[in-house]
Image: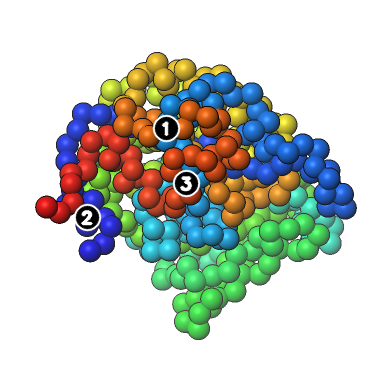
Amino acid sequence: MEKFDLIKQLKQPSSEKIVLLVMDGLGGLAKQNSKKDDTLKGTLTELEAAHTPNLDTLAKASETGLMVPILPGITPGSGPGHLALFGYDPLQYIIGRGILSALGVKFPVQDGDLCARVNFATVDTEGKVTDRRAGRIKDEINRKMCEKLATVGIGDVQYFIETEKEHRAALIFRGREMSDQLSETDPQTTGVPPLPVRPLDNEKVSKATADMINNFIKKVAEKLKDEHPANMILLRGWALHKKIPSFEEIYGLDACAIAGYPMYRGLASLAGMDVIDVESGVVSQFEKLKEIWGTHEFYFVHIKYTDSAGEDGDFDRKVSVIEEVDQNIPTILNLEPDVLAVTADHSTPASYKAHSWHSFPLLIKSRWSRMNREVNFGETDLTRGTLGIINSVDLMPLLMAHSGRLAKFGA
């Protein structure tokens, strides 16, 4: 029996409300001086270095542990990381980032549309990437770049480029049969040129699609050559639209998402959640939760800036975002959710400047929590948590059980 079939068989109604607070990229590593000198400036991760009295108190009254996002040693993208949190096996439900970006900006995706996530980037006079994120340009500059690219012609294929946020945008091709079996153009490093798109199989449609996109990229480069810092695009996450079982179908939950960044809104939309309009930010998102409290049974609240700081290698800024969340946690606690989970989708250590494979913190607070009153909310302490180390895909059954939504299995 498949896990989803079991959950559908055992699920039962309950009036209890669940909050899943995801601090994107929360997991970290101790701060280091440089590659040449690995002497630790301290022995604390970003979370452990932060002043978090509210989260520490909460951890002492909660089930706690660490989670592995995919499998040990496997570094997840944001899509697989969140799908796992929602209980979808990311090795089974392989969803390209492009479709999530398109849905996140509320683009009316049609069957056959080919979607990609865009990074506006900076290249030098030799065409080598100097900044994969173009300095995280402001949204208004992004919109101007998208407007400028709207006039690039590519024959019989329609395309749409829509601002997502900062340096990110969604690109959608429409008009003929296309394949998503394509390589990405982002080299994931600087000092080298963007990669050409290559077909990943031997199908004619894949080769034709790759040729069309490479032609499009050449025209984009010419169009943006005099711009700065956004004078190139990098394309990732090719995806054709795929339907997955909805959150309500699986869990019987009326769920909503309070997420400021479009990609995570798209992911929630794909899972059938009600996506709430909100400005990105800890205070604004927590206040929106307070405003709509009681309208749903499951609330997914996504905080992005822990991840952004980690990717930028800014240890202190990541600490600051964690502390801001901690200071505002009482807004959630005052709502008295029956079940509260605080976790991440993956680790983004500032010293690593990227997503990593490391396990990340988890706490689950309910009236049924088995607790260890000696732990604080930090990676080292949580190795002694009551949950141990679990896989992300096992979180949703736990939240269902803690909210009284799973009946007994067997006689």
The residue labelled by disc 3 is: 388
Q: Which type of secondary structure does the marked residue at label 1 adopt?
A: loop
Give the mark nearest the N terminus, 3 or 1: 1
> Which of the 4 quarters of the picture holds residue 53?
top right
- Image quadrant for the N terminus? bottom left
Q: Which type of secondary structure does the marked residue at label 3 adopt?
A: strand
Tell me: 29 left or right of 124.
left
Q: Disc 3 residue type?
A: Gly
Report how far apart the C-alphas of labels 2 and 1 lie in the structure.
27 Å
Residue that appears at 27% across and 25% down = 295
Q: Judge whether 206 appears above or below 265 on screen.
A: below
Residue that appears at 75% across and 50% down = 131
The residue labelled by disc 2 is: 6
> Which of the 4 quarters of the picture holds residue 175?
bottom left
Q: Disc 1 residue type?
A: Met
Return the residue nearer the eye: 170 or 356. Answer: 356
The residue labelled by disc 1 is: 371
**Measured from the top left, where is residue 172 in percent x and y?**
48, 56
Tell me: 44 left or right of 389.
right
Tell me: 300 left or right of 171.
left
Q: Residues within 10 Å of mark 2 (few under 14, many from 20)?
A: few
User: Residue 224's mark?
Assistant: none
Q: Judge whether 404 appears above or below 272 on screen.
A: above
Give the label, 2 or 1, closer to the camera: 1
> Which of the 4 quarters of the picture holds residue 323?
top right
Q: Disc 2 residue type?
A: Leu
**Measured from the top left, where is residue 6 in percent x and y?**
22, 55
Residue 30 in view of the camera: yes
Give the mark nearest the N terminus, 2 or 1: 2
